[in-house]
Image (cartoon, rainbow, N blue to C red):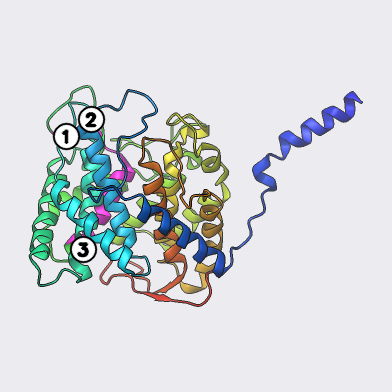
Amino acid sequence: MARTLWICVAVGLASPAWAAEKTSAPGLKEVRASIAAATAFVLDAQNEDGSWGGPAKPAHEFWSNPETHRAWTVATTALVCMTILDMTPSDATDAAYSRGIDYLLSQGLVKRPSDWDVDNTWAYVYGIQAFTRAVTDGRFAGTPKHEKLRAATQAVIDKLLSYQTPSGGWGYYDTDAYTRRPAWATSFMTAVGVIGLLEAKQAGFVVDEKHLKAAVRAVERSRLPSGAYTYSVEAIPSPGGATWIDQVKGSLSRIQVCNLALLLAGRDVSIEDLTTGLDQFFTHHRFLDVARKKPWPHEAYYLNSGYFYFFGHYYAALVIERLPAKDRAGYWSKLQHEIIKTQEKDGSMWDFYLNSYGKPYGVAYSVMALEASLAVDVPPTKPADEPVTRIRTEEPGG
């Protein structure tokens, strides 16, 4: 009896729950139903002032600075506005989008919350993309709002560049020095900044080349031989200990956004590099699963945090878009599965509890990724000389 019990325990330890999970490719109806439910949720979740998210329902008293919450609200609203442009147009989406853009125009130039808190940079990196897309979308062309959007885009670009660290990157906290120009930067925020600046530059906005090249070099310098990217932008990058965050299993979500940023910047990133990063993402996906919904940052294996989850899946989708057509289908089906399995009964997706931001940003990242999976694209293989053009298909990948 004891021997039988020991064998059962040993088998259980050798075969964790995630190993038994069957990854089935969702059908077209399932993906569209998921998008529809998420869309309904996020439209219903819009605040009276046009924003999404907010400081309601705090988990604890630590995050109490009003300007921190304004920065997070702007960043969340920017993400949702980007998402609405991917949704099937309707009177409801058009009205929500217009109200969201009005909120960003009035609140987008957030201030630094405190000496150590530089979360205003999240509002800038996603504000640039939301404003740029609002300008290029064309729905406001010929209206006073269009000129306001152009001015706001340039203003946010300039704000982001003013917070660039000496390392060339951007972060959201400062080190013990607490300088006017912050000192700490992360590879993944820097990569998001690079992507936004490249998009704005392509749309005709002024982006200082010296700042842009420094940011690209910062992402490049974070790249490790394993394919991982260091969390922080370091003078001498290293993977650290065997279970540290800079190992591949702690870098799964960063790999996608950093590879994409370097690809779009024209750096040496091959199709093999992209597929290797995606293979690492899905092979070791269980470490993102374990971290999702954990209440404390970096408490999971390899210091993964819950809020890595949807961020990583969104940028994985943007990487898959740029693969040759023959290589995309298998990755799309995996991505669809990993997103749809997280959907709640109310239609939302969330990965980390932080006031009321988690569900709107979770839906934003998820819907943009799922919408991309239902399209065939014309992929630029090097710098983004032309925007990706999506053509709807009758069947999703897989």
Magenta stretch holds residue 122: no
Q: Please indicate whether residue 117 sits to the left or right of residue 391 in the image.
A: left
Look at mark 2 in the image and give the residue it sits on. Answer: 117
Count of residue discs: 3
Q: Quadrant of the C terminus?
A: bottom right
Q: Residue furthest front?
A: 48
Q: Is residue 107 above or below residue 315?
A: above
Contact between labelled residues 3 and 2, with CB atoms less than 8 Å apart:
no
In space, the residues marked 1 and 3 are separated at their CA atoms by 25 Å
Residue drawn at the location 27% of the way across and 56% of the way down: 195
Q: Which residues are magenta?
A: 181-200
Secondary structure beneath dot 3 equals: helix
- What is the three-letter code of the residue carrying label 3? Ala
Contact between labelled residues 1 and 2, with CB atoms less than 8 Å apart:
yes
Front residue (pair 313, 247):
313
Q: Residues within 10 Å of mark 2 (few under 14, many from 20)?
A: some
Q: Is residue 48 above or below residue 11?
A: below
Residue drawn at the location 32% of the way across and 64% of the way down: 92
- What is the three-letter code of the residue carrying label 1? Arg
Q: Residues within 10 Å of mark 3 (few under 14, many from 20)?
A: many
Q: Please indicate whether residue 361 sits to the left or right of residue 208 in the image.
A: right
The residue mark sitting in front, 2 or 3, is 3
Residue 134 got which mark? 3
Look at mark 1 in the image and give the residue it sits on. Answer: 112
- What is the three-letter code of the residue carrying label 2? Asp
Q: Residues within 10 Å of mark 1 (few under 14, many from 20)?
A: some
The residue mark sitting in front, 1 or 3, is 3
Secondary structure beneath dot 2 equals: loop
